[in-house]
Image: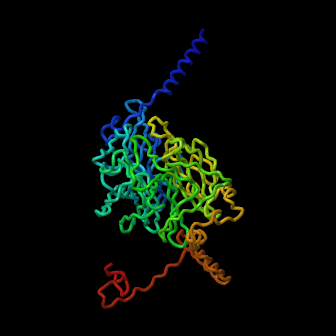
Amino acid sequence: MIFIRALWAAFWVSSLALAQTNKTIQRLGAKTVEPDINKQTWDWKPDSRCRLLAHESIVVNSQGKDLLIFDGGLAKFRHNWNGENIEVLELNPRTVVIDLSKSFSSRDFIPISQPKKPLGVPVVNRFGLWKGSNQDWVVMQGGHFYDADDWRNSSYWVEKKDIPPYTIWKYDLKTLIWTEIALPDEMRRFKRAFGGAAVSVPRTDKSYYIGGLWTPRASNDSFERLAVPQSGMLVYDHKTGTLTNETFGEPGMAYWHGSANHLEIGEKAGFLIALMAETAPGGVPIEDKPGINDEHGSGLSFEYVMLYDLDGKKWINQSTTFYKGEAPITRTRFCGQTVYSDETKTWELWVHGGMLMEPLGEAAPDAWVLTMPSFIWTRVEVPDSMVRMRSHTCNAVGSQLLIIGGYPPSAQVEKDAPCDSELIKVLDMNQVTWSSHYTPGTVYKTPEIVRKNAEFHLNRVDPHSGWADDSLRDAFHYTRAPPPAPPPPPNLSSGKIAAIGVSSAVVLALVVFGSCVAFGLVKIPRFRWPLPRLSGTGGRPGSARSFPGSDQGVAK
């Protein structure tokens, strides 16, 4: 009987524990949990963070060290509310800075700063972050003000009538303060675009934002239930503060939800490389259903990439090839980053995650690497749990691809998606393996599978389909001069070396002798010098006097 009672007790305790585990977690809007914005304490510390998507991130070198910055987007936070563990649905108001000069765990890292934006500073989705030659600050522009039932209950939600016109903001990494950059009236005619691709070229002090959509939540005068694809490419000059619009891609077409990077190739400024996800005629409104992701464009294949000659100011469509004919499935909302291997003298574009457009919302199941200058795609094996995500961002640091945020693919943002304990995931690109730690100071080397598939053994330096433009070929074939080596040590003759040795021995002997005197081991007989006779000075022996050339009595 006692044994049976013990079994029942164990069953009851385990059932209670299971019920607690399976208990429905409340997911509430931020103002429902705490109406006072000053008392909203949830943040990006390990015990509070849960999910992040549709944000933006960038790596800068400020005050002598690399920093990872992420900002904006949609968030979920863990929070204890009246003794109950809940999830807070919030528009992310925090600008988060992480020190990349130190190693950290992907689960336990703590930001070095994460202040909340004051009301009035835009809290937006899918915008652009830029950096110039002075990387003590970053620049924010574009995006839109998110609006959905589950996230509308935020202190940072803005009614449509209150959405500001086009603005550019600057964040000072020293003072942690956001400041609006004053724009002339002619620059305010630009439209705030959602989902464009941002890239910066710090050594020319220019940044770029390709395409995007002018959505119902981009400004107070935008259309209802319609989004307008934006053709062209914004160019921002950090020195002059001017903004211009240049052509991009096929004439009259617009592009969005892709990636853009800078290739330091050729003799001068280099090239931009863009891998965009969707396209449609620019300026022609398309339907934008509330609550549904805006995949209204035609999907773009990976059969070519677009490159922009920064000096010649022209776009080039370069054809690509696929290892054994295996082509990537068309996708959107992925992330892409370029890295350079000094060992093989090749550039690689890594593409991670995303979701399919047919059927809409299904996860893209793989990751791909484009090797240049051969322009050959290779699929790399990545565990499903680490690749099936969308609306994330990634930054290449050494041999590590840092993947920030992300959400399970779906046609809508589901508020009941489980929390992810690893807000930042670390992919070792050299070994194509996942790590739970970030390590500073690593060096990227093209992984073996990419070397094999991209025909490194054949010394291929040209695309199979040929070069689309001679300037692109010449830029990839140009060898940049390596940085100057430190000066070699002086070449000393044997006589000089002997003289240095003798001098060192004399100095050492004097040091030893002085030490013996100081400690009383050697006594020196006293000798008194006769005092000098002073005339015409009115002084006495031992009094201070000024002499020509002395610092005494001279004002400094």
Q: Could you tell me which residue is drawn at 44 percent across and 30 percent down? A: 25
Can residue 115 be seen at all in this image of the molecule? no
Q: Is residue 26 above or below residue 92?
A: above
Nearer-the-camera pick, 412 or 115: 412
Q: Quadrant of residue 492?
A: bottom right
* Residue 334 screen position, x and y as percent: 52, 49
The colour scheme applied to this rendered structure is rainbow
Q: Position of residue 458 (x, y in %)?
A: 71, 63
Q: Is residue 318 above or below residue 151?
A: below
- In the drawing, does residue 404 fall left or right of residue 488? left
Identify the image quadrant of the C terminus: bottom left
In percent of width and height, residue 295 lies at: 46, 46
Judge by depth and name the residue closer to the eye, 25 or 443.
25
Q: Which part of the image, by quadrant, shows the N terminus?
A: top right
The answer, for residue 416, to whether it is visible in the render is yes
Closer to the camera, 191 or 334?
191
Q: Residue 32 falls in which quadrant of the image?
A: top left
Compared with 510, 156 (above or below) is above
Residue 419 coordinates in the image, percent (x, y) = 49, 38
Residue lying furthest bottom: 536
**Above or below, comparing residue 76 to residue 255 in the picture:** above
- In the rendered structure, the answer to whether residue 410 lies left or right of residue 348 reads left
